[in-house]
Image (tube, rainbow, N blue to C red):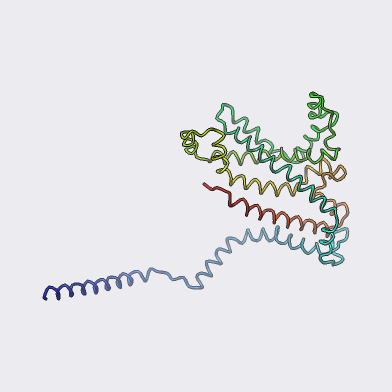
């Protein structure tokens, strides 16, 4: 009986001591705790906005303001200087979709995108795999593969214009060696768009190759060593290791290459000027002619807004489709 009483007293004493210890700890820690009130959260939010203010000012001046200004301008008929004259609302957008000219330009733009995006990424991937070989003097070939990135669009267009020359061009000379008739590359409606697409593909090789090579070199070598031990060959390692681990880079290149192709202008303006017979009249060149040849700035801006909506929709769709299939290390 006495033992039970002593045990209960000890248990009660331990409980009291435990509560006193917890209270003392809480009392000791309470002064060091800083409770964040609403004013402190507002202060932290204001501090963060101050850091973002320079970027916001730049975006507001060079992105948001021109965008809203363009949206407003597309609702008006303008004079030769671009001043708004008559408010027509959405009439110019209706004219865009009812006229066949914009549809034809959009079809040519889609074909140009198909000719440039997939071939440029495929060729760049081959060049990146070759540049990753461990050979003596490979640095020289890496420099050659990436050299198109430093060539301006005007210089590249002039170089290829000489290569496409019907009488003195290198391409027709090579065709003559295999007894093929010369091709009037830039004056034949059947060949003009593929010829301009080749220039666009060549110009994109440098940037794409650099990105793909960096992605390949970031793949851990241990993965390849394990695959070789398991008996995997080069082709199987390419499909099962290299391509899946390159998927983030490939997704980025597909999206950016599509955006660049839909906005292509320089090569077309210099090489064909939208011809022959409108065979290379892409949407951006159509906007350029509408604004600076016909001086119909409101209609041109409306076309630009439609192109902006198309690019935005395609970009969101590509992100939605590709991100599920992207493998991040």
Which residue: 64% across, 45% down? Answer: 253
Image x and y of residue 79, in percent: 88, 61
Vertical relation: 91 (above or below) 203: below
Q: Quadrant of residue 236?
A: top right
Image x and y of residue 269, in percent: 81, 44
Task: Tell how many labels.
Answer: 0
Image x and y of residue 95, in percent: 85, 60
Camera-side residue: 143 or 102? 102
Camera-side residue: 9 or 3? 3
Camera-side residue: 129 or 86? 129
Q: In which quarter of the image is residue 125?
A: top right
Camera-side residue: 268 or 327? 327
Image x and y of residue 29, in percent: 35, 69
Which residue: 55% across, 65% down? Answer: 47
Q: In which quarter of the image is residue 53?
A: bottom right
Extreme residue in the left direction: 2
Vertical relation: 107 (above or below) 15: above
Give the position of the N terminus as an image quadrant: bottom left
Which residue: 85% across, 43% down? Answer: 275
Q: In this view, does 99 lie to the left or right of 247?
A: right
Which residue: 51% across, 34% down? Answer: 232
Vertical relation: 90 (above or below) 190: below
Q: In this view, does 196 lie to the left or right of 35?
A: right
């Amino acid at each position: 009986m006495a033992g039970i009483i002593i045990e209960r007293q000890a248990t009660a004493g331990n409980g009291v001591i435990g509560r006193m210890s917890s209270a003392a700890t809480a009392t000791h820690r309470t002064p060091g705790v800083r409770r964040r009130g609403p004013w402190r959260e507002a202060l932290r939010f204001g501090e963060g906005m101050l850091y973002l203010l320079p970027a916001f000012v730049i975006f507001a001046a060079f992105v948001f303001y021109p965008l809203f200004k363009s949206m407003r301008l597309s609702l008006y008929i303008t004079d030769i200087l671009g001043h708004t004259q008559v408010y027509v609302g959405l009439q110019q957008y209706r004219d865009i979709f009812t006229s066949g000219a914009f549809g034809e330009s959009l079809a040519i733009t889609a074909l140009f995108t198909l000719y440039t995006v997939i071939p440029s990424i495929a060729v760049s991937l081959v060049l990146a795999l070759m540049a990753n070989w461990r050979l003596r003097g490979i640095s020289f070939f890496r420099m050659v593969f990436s050299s198109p990135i430093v060539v301006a669009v005007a210089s590249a267009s002039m170089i290829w214009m000489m290569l496409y020359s019907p009488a003195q061009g290198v391409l027709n000379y090579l065709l003559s060696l295999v007894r093929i008739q010369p091709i009037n590359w830039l004056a034949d409606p059947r060949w003009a768009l593929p010829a301009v697409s080749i220039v666009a593909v060549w110009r994109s090789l440098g940037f794409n190759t650099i990105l793909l090579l960096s992605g390949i070199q970031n793949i851990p070598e241990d993965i390849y060593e394990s695959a070789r031990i398991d008996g995997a060959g080069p082709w199987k390692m390419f499909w099962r290791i290299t391509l899946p681990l390159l998927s983030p880079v490939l997704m980025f290149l597909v999206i950016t290459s599509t955006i660049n192709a839909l906005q292509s202008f320089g090569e077309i303006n210099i090489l064909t000027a939208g011809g022959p017979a409108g065979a290379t009249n892409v949407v951006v060149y159509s906007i350029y002619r509408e604004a600076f040849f016909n001086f119909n700035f409101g209609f041109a801006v409306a076309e630009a807004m439609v192109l902006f909506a198309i690019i935005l929709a395609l970009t969101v769709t590509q992100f939605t489709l590709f991100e599920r299939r992207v493998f991040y290390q």
